[in-house]
Every structure is written in C-alpha cells, then in structure tokens.
C-alpha cells in the first residue's frame, strides 16, 4: 500500500515540486493550499505523513498543527518554514510537530526525512502491544495509558516519548537520543525541550513527580524508564 502524504502549502510552485518528488518516491499525494483545508484533509483522509508550511494565509501552520493534534491526528508532521530560528523550532515541536525543515531546503534531505518519519510510523503500527508497569497500563496500539485504572490524557508527543521509554525500558537514554529518535531532530539540540516533556509526562504518570518511580533521571546523562 503506498504511503499517503498530505502537503499543506500555499505556494503553487512549491506544491508542484513537492508533489512531483513524493509521487516519484511512490507516495500517494493529497494537497491543500490553506491551513483550514489541511486540517480537514488530515482528518478525512488519514494521511501517513503531513508536510505543513508555517507561513500560510489566515490559519498559520502552527495553528493547523495544534488543531490536527488536538483533533487526534497522530501522523508525523514535518513543518516547512523560511523562519528557521530556535524559537520557531521549539514552538513547532511543542505543538506536536515531529521534524522541521528550513526553507530553502534540499529535496534529497527532505525526502530522507520523509522516509525516516514514514518508517517510524510503520514500526509503530507493526509492534502493537499492551504492557503493565507498576500502576500503569499502556496500550501502544490504542494510544491509551491508564494509571490506577483511570485513563491518562497524553498529547501525541507525550505518548511518543512514553513509547520510546517503554521500548528502551531499563536502558539509560540520553536527551540527544530522545531528540533524534522521538523528535527526528538532527539540527541544533534543544535538550530543554526533552526536559520539558519529561516533566509533563511525570506529572501525568507519577504519583510523586518530584520523586519519580518510572522515569528516573540519570545524572549528567539522561533518563531511564524503570520496568518492574
Ligand atoms: Ca507559505
């Protein structure tokens, strides 16, 4: 089955370039010229990946990204933008984007990142299972986590982070690994982004977030997810 990619981009030439290259890669492409249309198609067509321009008329790419995530779109989102400052990257990643490409970008690099995100999505779909750790019941297929039997409300990114911890339970994982593997991020390392997300996750999962039982800090290195 070909991967379905949604392009949200208001510049017609850029839409054509992206469409041609993705179709050449064997993807099925759907395209929107506005953020509103992008959100609608992301919900209606269930793409495997979204390429989302930040600078769009009316609804910005950031707002579209937030809307997609809050309405349950879990597909990876790669933001495309001419604005390439650290602030924008942080804003995009915290709103639930998975990767970032500053314009102008090289098409081979973009395609490499598209392939990486699609592979990650396929792996997630192939390895569904349920897991119990202490008071936590984690269903990786249903994107559901319960603590003491009660459903915990996690954002798509928080869930991805938890899934990564679960896959590497018992191991020490560095912030850099988390940024690369969970955020798909190879540029400037924003390790405080990782720390912010770990803090949010602890608040939701730990009975005492100040003294975590599940996601413990490994001094100067990163974190370890405690299994059993
Ligand atoms: Ca634009």
Image (spheres, rainbow, N blue to C red):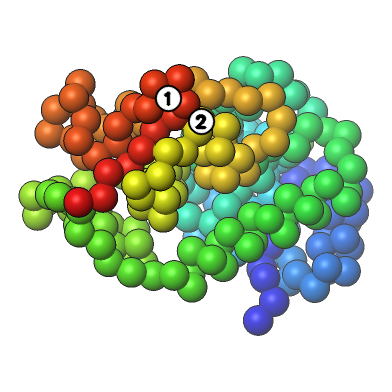
Looking at the picture, tell me which residue is in the foreground, 35 or 218.
Answer: 218
Residue extending farthest bottom? 1
Residue 101 image position (x, y, % from top left): 75, 37
Q: Secondary structure at mark 1?
A: helix
Asked whether disc 1 touches disc 2, contact meaning CB atoms under 8 Å apart, the reply is yes
* Mark 2 Cβ inside 8 Å of ligand 1: no
Q: Badge 1, how many Cα within 10 Å: few under 14, some, many 20+?
A: some
Label 1 or label 2, whichever comes before in sequence order? 2
Looking at the picture, tell me which residue is in the foreground, 141 or 12.
Answer: 141
Residue 172 image position (x, y, % from top left): 42, 38
The image shows residue 224, relative to residue 162, as above or below, that is: above
The image shows residue 221, relative to residue 12, as above or below, that is: above
| Residue 71 seen by the camera | no
Mark 1 or mark 2: which is in front? Answer: 2
Residue at coordinates 20% horizontally, 59% vertically from top-left? 132
| Residue 54 seen by the camera | yes
The image shows residue 111, relative to residue 176, as above or below, that is: below
* Residue picked out by circle 1: 195
* Residue picked out by circle 2: 175
Residue extending farthest left? 148
Q: CA distance from mark 1 to mark 2?
A: 8 Å
Is 124 left or right of 50, judged from the image as shown? left
Is 110 left or right of 63, judged from the image as shown? right
Residue at coordinates 20% horizontally, 21% vertically from top-left? 210
All told, the count of numbered labels is 2
> Dividing the image into four equal quarters, which quarter contains ligand 1?
top right
Looking at the picture, tell me which residue is in the foreground, 107 or 6.
Answer: 107
Residue at coordinates 68% horizontally, 55% vertically from top-left? 116
Residue at coordinates 73% horizontally, 50% vertically from top-left? 113
């Amino acid at each position: 089955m070909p991967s379905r990619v949604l392009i949200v981009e208001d510049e017609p030439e850029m839409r054509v370039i992206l469409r041609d290259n993705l179709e050449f890669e064997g993807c099925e492409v759907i395209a929107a010229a506005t953020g509103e249309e992008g959100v609608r198609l992301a919900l209606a067509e269930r793409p495997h990946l979204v390429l989302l321009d930040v600078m769009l008329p009316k609804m910005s790419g950031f707002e579209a990204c937030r809307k997609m995530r809050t309405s349950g779109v879990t597909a990876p989102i790669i933001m495309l933008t001419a604005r390439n400052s650290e602030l924008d990257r942080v804003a995009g990643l915290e709103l639930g984007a998975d990767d970032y490409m500053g314009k102008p970008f090289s098409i081979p690099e973009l395609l490499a990142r598209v392939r990486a995100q699609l592979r990650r999505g396929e792996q997630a779909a192939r390895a569904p299972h349920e897991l119990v750790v202490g008071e936590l019941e984690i269903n990786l297929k249903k994107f559901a986590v319960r603590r003491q039997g009660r459903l915990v409300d996690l954002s798509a990114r928080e869930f991805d982070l938890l899934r990564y911890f679960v896959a590497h339970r018992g191991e020490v994982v560095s912030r850099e690994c988390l940024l690369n593997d969970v955020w798909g991020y190879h540029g400037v390392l924003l390790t405080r982004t990782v720390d912010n997300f770990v803090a949010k996750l602890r608040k939701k999962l730990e009975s005492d977030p100040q003294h975590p039982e599940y996601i413990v800090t490994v001094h100067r290195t990163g974190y370890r997810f405690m299994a059993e």
